[in-house]
Amino acid sequence: MPVRNAEGEFTSVGGTLNENPVEILENRTADNKRTRLLGYFKTEATLFSDLKAVVNLSLEHNAMTGSTYKPSYAVLEGMTEHGYAQKIYGEYTTGQLEAYLNYNKIFGKHSVGATAGYSFLENIYEGFGAQRSGFETDLFGYNNLGAGYNFRLGDVYSYKGKSNLVSFFGRVNYAYDGKYMITGTVRRDGSSRFGANNKWGVFPSAAVAWKISDEDFMKSSEKWINNLKLRVSYGVTGNQDGIGEYKSLSILGVGNDSYYDPATGSWSSAYSPTQNPNPNLKWESTATTNIGVDFSLFNRITGSFEWYSKYTKDLLYTYQVPQPPYLVGTMLANVGELSNKGIELTLNANIVKKGKFTWDANLTFAKNKQIIEKLSNQVYQTDAIYSGSLHGLSGMSNQFSQIIAEGYPLGTFWGYESKGLDENGEFIFRHGRKSHRQRTTRFYFRTRNEFLLW
């Protein structure tokens, strides 16, 4: 497709909302500036010969300004809005404190290590913005928003938010004779993002390892088995990302309704609930079981084999709820469950190493089976969640390319199934829709050779 048509105008992709990239570059002004400050402080103190105290402090501050102008001759917003200008400013600050004790002791064939600590993380963000459209001239650009004659609700806005994450953590390691290893950890994390009933979560883990190649019964095989280690682990992790702040609280906002104030004799905007409270909002959690074998053969081949099973529960989604008893028609809740099972194999081989010539090869094989186990319960229900919007395509309003449903993996493609063309060249579709299961299998093979001339 040419950049411009015969009349010299920028071409566009018919039936879509996609814009000509060259037109975007030439007809729009977008100037952004970011100032970033990073600070870090660390101190250590040896309390006893085997005990050390560590304190870390860090600060990150970001300030960003943005200015955008789309002239009256620009496609889409420019032409339809008769020019569009915007100015924004935002600040984001993250501060973290981490303090912990480390203990390490070796006596005979025994090795013991322990860590206990506390961390505090705070995020604060705020900003504001203004936009206006309807400009008689494009000469001002984004430097005179007041020149625009279109006034709309939401043209001026500001925001501020804050979140805290507090953690207590501990870990104990034990090893005997370098052959038997045990590790246990536990975290207790509290997040301000969750409901009053579930702000805290406890996440334990444990792992054991056995270096089989160091056993006496393996002495006869040491010429070709250089290393053989078996390891097993189980652990639970929590997730708080992706939901933002204040999602467990009742929130009021300016709606489309107005009310008459007899005291002032004027109409005013009415505030109404925009979010239902959910005091039971809690951590998403993933329990993982892993069994692995690490090996080294003939001093040339190294690799590992892994089998894992991961089960995630209390996945968050915004569900439709009845009105009444709820004041708002949607609610963020922990309902979903998801499973992943798979294997991974990695091999690294030094095929040739002779003189100045070397040849290495790496092979990786991975297979994963994912299933959405649960999306609904007795209170919050949905048959399916559609994703991959096709709304920008002509004739595809309210159509989607993927589905999230029980019994299928995430990202399953979902759409009409074509049976071919009829005598008029029109597509023939099966009745209804058909989903297509997906399993993920990855296979990589890479070689590298080097020949040194000097």
Image: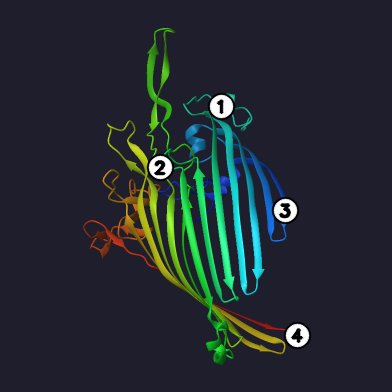
Mark with earlier residue (1, 4): 1
Instruction: Assess whether mark 1 and mark 3 are in contact (beta carbons under 8 angstroms).
Output: no
Mark with earlier residue (3, 2): 3
The residue positioned farthest toward the right in the image shown: 454
Residue 44 is tagged as 3
The residue positioned farthest toward the left in the image shown: 431
Q: Nearer the viewer, residue 250 or 423?
A: 250
Instruction: Assess whether mark 4 and mark 3 are in contact (beta carbons under 8 angstroms).
Output: no
| Quadrant where the image shows the C terminus | bottom right
* Camera-nearest label, 3 or 4: 3
Identify residue for label 1.
Answer: 136
Residue 281 is tagged as 2
Query: Rounded to the nearest whole Å, what is the CA distance between mark 4 and mark 2?
Result: 65 Å
Is 13 displayed left or right of 131 in the figure?
left
Name the residue: 38% across, 28% down: 273
Q: Nearer the viewer, residue 50 or 263?
A: 50
